[in-house]
Image (cartoon, helix red, strand yellow):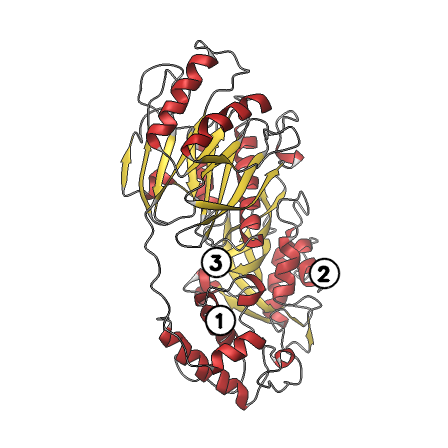
């Protein structure tokens, strides 16, 4: 059993692993990646098969450490953050290892074409690998989870520095009692099944974090640890929260406009008037654009859409267009928080063709909640299906990192994309990530089986290569509108509960 703490235990390992997301690193070296994140060192060739691989890591932990086997795991979302995950199998039975980040998710090597990424634990490579479980104490005797001091410290009311996981004292019980009072006043679920008790545990931290968030606090102010303002507010009589505003659902429109710089049978002067008319007709709250054109063309759209309240989120590169991507938002619905551009990793490119993604974080004026929107365009060369999958997974991994950076909820991300792929990209996104095609979640759909690349012709049956991927659960409707006289792609629109 362990007698020492890992150099980077628990959340520290998670934080280290997240810094690698989107990077081409440790491909084919999952065990090395995992032990490096915890700083525990190699376990060696434990089973004597002349390979020091992930299977060795698991077998040594079973023999000399402490593990929780898959058979004892009913809910993958309950697997704690900051433990090592293990699989058997693979073409050479090397197995696989990764770092759990909580919520049924992990940071893993080879998420796509050699990139480190975030993925679901459940179902990972299910056809070739078997999930074994997770390790709490690894084979070299390091405890992976314990961020607790060897000797418990006494937590004191009003002294924030004394509040660490594992801290003890009467003030911990007092804190828990005040959490119960405030949680009830805020309409939150009861935070404890039994207690509270005199030891500050993850249950206490999570309960306090829920209260802090219900107060409207974000970021470090809602981390579940008490500071001066938390102590003061907990000690006071709770005030019933104001009724949460009921906001109307908002619509997101994603459309490849067919760049004016590309050859087309209809002139841009004619098409642009029809495009703007369709945008005004649909009146989207957020408009995600692919192939808007050069910076001068983007400026034309800026001027044409501003009178109806659609403003450019400025998610662009130095040339002003993000290589023809752009995002517009309804100024009456949203406040812009941040915007940016993401260049895809070189390992995902086809013949070096960069396909940048643009993103923006917007704050909803009615609810105060933040949403992350993005526009992407994948490789259009026919033989590049594998690259398209790698590009899409890299985009979504980046969006998850941006969401965490700007305190965007996991279910508040939307990405409009021309995948240039019928079902190949969409199916793999559904398998490997929490993102879903809006059509697959919508309560009501229109045009689901219409080809979105219309080729300047009237609506025809076929598959959609244009997709709105989202993590939102409550998609009220999804539709596409045939527009063969305005562009060679049909706009996709999703109505999402705010």
**Circles 2, 3 touching at the beta carbon (< 8 Å):** no
Q: Quadrant of residue 348?
A: top right
Q: Position of residue 470 (x, y in %)?
A: 43, 43
The residue positioned 43% from the left and 85% from the top of the image is 195
Q: Which residue is mark 2?
A: 42
Q: Is residue 342 left or right of residue 45?
A: left
For image coordinates 71% across by 68% down, the residue present is 7
Which numbered dot is residue 104?
3
Q: Is residue 39 left or right of residue 11?
A: right
Assign a secondary structure to mark 1.
Answer: helix
How far is mark 2 from mark 1, CA to CA?
A: 33 Å
Residue 206: numbered disc: 1
Return the x and y of residue 161 as percentages of the image width and height: 65, 78
Please state which of residues 177 and 60 is positioned toward the viewer in this rendering: 177
Residue 419: image x %, image y %?
48, 30
Q: Quadrant of residue 211?
A: bottom left
Q: Earlier in the sequence, mark 2 or mark 3?
A: 2
Q: Quadrant of the N terminus?
A: bottom right
Q: Earlier in the sequence, mark 2 or mark 1?
A: 2
Q: Find residue 221 and name its label.
A: none
């Amino acid at each position: 059993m362990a007698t020492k703490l890992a150099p980077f235990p628990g959340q520290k390992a998670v934080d280290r692993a997240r810094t690698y997301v989107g990077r081409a690193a440790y491909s084919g070296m999952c065990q090395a990646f995992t032990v490096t994140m915890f700083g525990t060192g190699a376990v060696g060739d434990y089973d004597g098969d002349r390979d020091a691989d992930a299977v060795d890591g698991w077998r040594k932990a079973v023999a000399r450490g402490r593990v929780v086997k898959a058979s004892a795991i009913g809910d993958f979302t309950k697997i704690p953050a900051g433990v090592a995950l293990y699989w058997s199998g693979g073409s050479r039975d090397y197995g696989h290892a990764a770092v759990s980040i909580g919520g049924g998710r992990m940071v893993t090597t080879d998420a796509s074409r050699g990139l480190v990424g975030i993925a679901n634990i459940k179902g990972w490579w299910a056809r070739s690998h078997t999930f074994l479980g997770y390790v709490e104490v690894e084979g070299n005797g390091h405890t992976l989870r314990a961020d607790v001091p060897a000797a418990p410290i006494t937590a004191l009311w009003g002294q924030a520095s004394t509040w660490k996981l594992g801290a003890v004292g009467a003030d911990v019980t007092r804190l828990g009692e005040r959490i119960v009072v405030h949680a009830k006043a805020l309409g939150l679920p009861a935070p404890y099944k039994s207690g509270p008790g005199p030891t500050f545990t993850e249950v206490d931290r999570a309960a306090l974090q829920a209260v802090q968030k219900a107060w409207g606090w974000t970021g470090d102010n809602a981390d579940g640890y008490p500071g001066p303002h938390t102590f003061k507010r907990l000690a006071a009589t709770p005030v019933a929260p104001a009724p949460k505003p009921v906001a109307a659902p908002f619509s997101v429109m994603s459309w490849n406009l067919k760049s004016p710089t590309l050859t087309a049978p209809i002139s841009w002067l004619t098409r642009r008037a029809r495009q703007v008319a369709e945008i005004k007709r649909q009146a989207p709250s957020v408009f995600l654009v692919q192939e808007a054109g050069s910076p001068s063309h983007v400026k034309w759209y800026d001027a044409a859409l501003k009178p109806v309240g659609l403003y450019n989120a400025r998610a662009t590169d130095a040339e002003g267009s993000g290589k023809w991507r752009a995002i517009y938002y309804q100024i009456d619905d949203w406040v812009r928080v941040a915007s940016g551009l993401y260049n895809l990793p070189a390992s995902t490119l086809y013949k070096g063709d960069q396909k940048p993604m643009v993103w923006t974080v917007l704050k909803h004026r009615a609810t105060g909640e933040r949403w992350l929107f993005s526009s992407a365009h994948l490789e259009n060369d026919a033989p590049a299906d594998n690259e398209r999958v790698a590009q899409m997974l890299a985009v979504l991994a980046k969006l998850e990192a941006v969401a965490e950076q700007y305190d965007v909820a996991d279910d508040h991300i939307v990405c409009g994309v021309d995948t240039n792929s019928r079902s190949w990209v969409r199916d793999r996104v559904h398998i490997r990530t929490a993102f879903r095609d809006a059509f697959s979640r919508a309560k009501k759909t229109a045009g689901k089986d219409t080809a979105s690349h219309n080729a300047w012709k009237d609506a025809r049956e076929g598959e959609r290569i244009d997709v709105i991927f989202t993590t939102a659960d409550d998609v009220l409707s999804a539709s596409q509108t045939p527009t063969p006289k305005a562009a060679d792609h049909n706009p996709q629109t999703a109505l999402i509960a705010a």
